[in-house]
Image (spheres, rainbow, N blue to C red):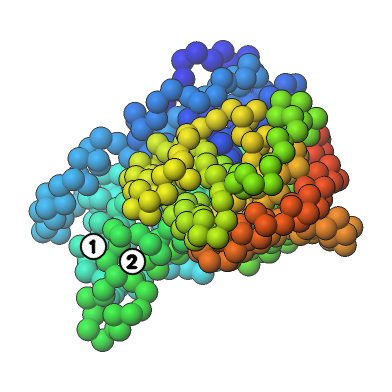
Amino acid sequence: MVAPDFVHARVPDVCLVLEGTYPYVAGGVSSWVHDIVRSLPELQFSLLHIGPRLGAYGEPRYEIPPNVTQMVEHYLHDSVEAHDMLHREQLRARLDRRIRSARRETAAPSRALAAIRRLHLDSVVDDALIADLATGDLDVEQLLHGNTAFETITEIYRECAPGASFLDFFWHFRSMHVPLVRLLGAELPSAQVYHSLSTGYAGVLAAVASKRTGRPMVLTEHGIYARERELELARAPWIAERTRDPRMPTTSVSPLRRVWSRFFSRLAQIAYRQSQTIITLSEVNRRKQLSDGAARDRTSIIPNGVDIDHLSAIIGEPAPRGAQEPLRVGFVGRVVPIKDVLTFIKACHIALRDVKLAVEIIGPTDEDPVYAARCQNLVDRLGRSEEIRFVGPKKLADIYGKLDVVVLTSFSEGQPLVILEAHAVGVPAIATDVGACREMLEGRDGEDKALGPSGLVTQVAAQEATAAALVRFARDPELRRRMSVAARARVRAHYTKAKMIDDYRALYDELVR
């Protein structure tokens, strides 16, 4: 779908390929995209947004800058698929009929279907595989009804998930590949450079657009998408854990989880292979990219940055905390499972046994209402609704000036903007040891480390350790003061928005030329 309100003056310089983020979801990557586009007014951008289905989002959460001249939207699922997901028995009957009936064949073998087979059965992602995907010569009807496609699905099942029921495997295969096939057949906008903000479906779409047009592709990973999906898959209730093969132990990883995990890993390798430049935010994440198949000579680090003077002007100095006042604690972000807000709540509950805290959970709760309700119910069950409050999104000016410490208990992060914003005005942080968090709180190299720590690092799902860090902050004002000084110095030395924008301007200029 092409948004009708844009005027196409020329081929855009940069097409940003986005999955489930800007302009419909606030914060995180979306804020970064909005910043980049507004800071480079000399360039024209188009937006290629991938959403789950038509109507999944409301109005855009951002005012689109005038140098965005085109917006194209594609959807992974349609209303028919949503209907099917609610009627599994209908799918079972349809599958039985497909097995018994003759199936339509295409005049020539589908190169895209051969590429899908290789995605699952080969150990290498190469240029030929990407070129075959880029043909887009496979549609959903052929995938689900074609004889050759059925034989391919059966072969993949036998090789990759023989311990699962074939019906379950077919359902999951369909869920993975119908969105992929739909995207491969979609019309893609022209651009001088295709810049994907993740791997996954967005990364594949950018790779296909790059392959078709011969124009370069750039990939920026804030978090490592395939690793994040693996975390989600480990907890996904919609994948059966028990295998159907009595010879396999029930404690083994579900074959279907392995298939999903391998699928997202292969999608990442497609994006890595096609990208001329692969950017991430920290050395920790760069090492993960290399481990997952990225070429070393294509990888680089461009840290996020903030406008220190602007933040200081709109936020001001944090209001001092009185000696007897509660420690002002803030979680700032989306209330979603990957942020592990449940551990944050439990940690605050434990710390409240020893010290006084005033806790605010600041951010939207509408992305995963079921999870947000679990978090609210936990606060109620613990009897902490007076001390731990959900306050929804707030303007930047109303957040950090009223906090003594920000806390991130995420399972996965890239380089959290929350820490940079807080540090810019002298607010230290407690964060899990994921992504760039340790670098941001303890320093990346000798010069950076010499500034001193600007926060405390804990492990994932460590509610006791997070609680102990909160107690330490509450009881030690001198610690807070030292970390506040280090926080300001670290951001000013290593994480300015001006440097980040200059780096991307230089990259775009080189590739557009």
Residue 23 placement, left or right of 74: right
Q: Is mark 1 on a helix, strand or loop?
A: helix
Q: Name the residue under label 1.
A: 168
Residue 218 placement, left or right of 351: right
Q: Residue 41 in the image: x percent, y percent?
A: 72, 21
From what the image shows, is residue 151 above or below residue 97? below
Q: In which quarter of the image is residue 16?
A: top right
Q: Residue 270 in the image: x percent, y percent?
A: 55, 54
> Disc 2, disc 1: CB below 8 Å?
yes
Residue at the front extreme of this rendering: 324
Residue type highlighted by circle 2: Leu
Residue 187 seen in render: no
Residue at image location 40% in from the left, 26% down from the top = 58
Residue at image location 22% in from the left, 47% down from the top = 85
Q: Which of marks 2 and 1 is nearer the N terminus?
A: 1
Q: Residue 470 carries which label?
A: none
Residue 391 placement, left or right of 287: left
How many residues crowd around disc 2 within 10 Å: few (fewer than 14), some, or many (20 or more)? many
Which residue is nearer to you in this view: 184 or 64? 64
Residue type highlighted by circle 1: Asp
Q: Is mark 2 on a helix, strand or loop?
A: helix
From what the image shows, is residue 372 above or below residue 344? above
Residue at image location 50% in from the left, 60% down from the top = 353
Q: Mark 2 points at which residue?
A: 256
How much space separates mark 2 and mark 1, taking CA atoms? 8 Å
